[in-house]
Amino acid sequence: MDIQKIGVLSLIKAAITDEASSLPEGFDLDAALGEVKSHQISSMLYYGAMNCGLDKNTPAMKQLFAVLCKCVAVSEKQKFEVGSVCKAFSDNNIDHMPLKGTVLREMYPHSDMRLMSDADILIKTEQYDSIRPIMLELGFEEGLESNHEYVWKKAGIVIELHKRIIPSYNKDYYAYYGNGWRLAVPSETVPHRFEMSAEDQMIYLFTHFAKHYRDGGIGLRHITDLYVYRRYIGRLNEEYIKKELETLGTYEFYTNITDTINVWFNGANSTEKTDFITDFIFASGVYGKLSQKRIAQTLKASTGGKGSMKNAKKRHIIRMIFPSLENMKLHYGFLEKLPFLLPVTWVMRLFKIVFFKGKKAKNYYNDMKNISTEDISDYQQVLNYVGLDFKFEEQLP
């Protein structure tokens, strides 16, 4: 691990623990900012740098402070809006369970360290007719529905009301979770609010991490989430976690990520594998590289590497042009009653792509054309090396 990476991780640890960390000789904050600018961790770096005694008047620190001020404002706005939604749900007998960053942000020393791209809340789909007027009354506008969520927006705040906690097209993980309500436990203090047990929450956070890792990569913020969660919760039932992760097929990956976290934050010695994971995460940005996402999508189309690599690109492109009936129902509601009109909606979709998204479609085609069989095979080996795989032929969203 190079000096800049060690320095960045030392600053993150200093921010989380609210204690000074030793920075390696030769660490350059300016150079580090260039390496991690796409990871959305500026607030953590500023707090960590202050705890480590760095001069707040340097250009790099002033740059971080400017971002921090924006993060504080956004964080307070997110907190208010999410709180308003959850309170309205409780007041109106709407069952709900906050997920991911909505829960994690309260475990950080400062909530602005953990901004959310969107706030995730699990709901029951049978209550959605009652939920819609509540969201409208709160000033939100309804966005596009996806496979697993209803999207609502208000002045830069995005709230995703989940139908299920894992998309159904992630077949292996969805087979374990279903819609997620089987894991929900009623809150002891807030009516109609639900939460997972500490162990199930850890498993879910890790599953979400694994899903993004194999789908093209995931960044520093999300592996830091796992460290923060464990530090906040304390002792967990490791036997239960092991058993459930073995069912999910991710326990080997879990041990490798745990080893990496121990290297980053607990003083463990690095290995070839932890260094490999570290480099992969630093290079990924907050949600992975587009090029890696394209390769991962193509790998899925080859049945997780078990089908023909040669035909994988062709199969993936065909699926993108001709999505499944379930996917098309999200865009053309009449298919619920008239499923035989699916070919008609494919033609309508092609018309929109050609005449309204031609440039985007061309760029996508060129990206796919440049992916080689070796790229796909190499990415499969990258995943297998750390204990991940696609054990299914995924239906694209």
Image (spheres, rainbow, N blue to C red):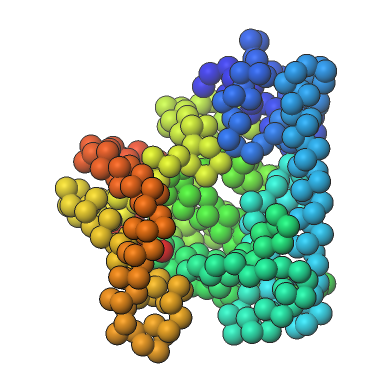
Q: Nearer the viewer, residue 69 or 106?
A: 69
Above or below residue 363? Residue 171 is: below
Above or below residue 78? Residue 18 is: above
Q: Position of residue 42 (x, y in %)?
A: 70, 34
**Residue in the image at 73% along x and 57% along y:** 155
- Which picture quadrant has residue 320? bottom left
**Residue in the image at 63% along x and 25% along y:** 33
**Residue in the image at 74% along x and 34% along y:** 67
Q: Position of residue 227 (x, y in %)?
A: 64, 43
The answer to whether residue 94 is visible is no
Q: Position of residue 294 (x, y in %)?
A: 36, 46
Q: Nearer the viewer, residue 369 or 163?
A: 369
The answer to whether residue 93 is visible is yes
Q: Is 109 left or right of 100, judged from the image as shown?
A: right
**Quadrant holding the C terminus:** bottom left
Above or below residue 322? Residue 334 is: below
In the displayed orientation, state which residue is furthest to the top: 26
In the displayed orientation, state which residue is furthest to the bottom: 337
**Residue in the image at 39% along x and 82% along y:** 335
- Which picture quadrant has residue 143? bottom right
Q: Is 355 left or right of 275, judged from the image as shown?
A: left
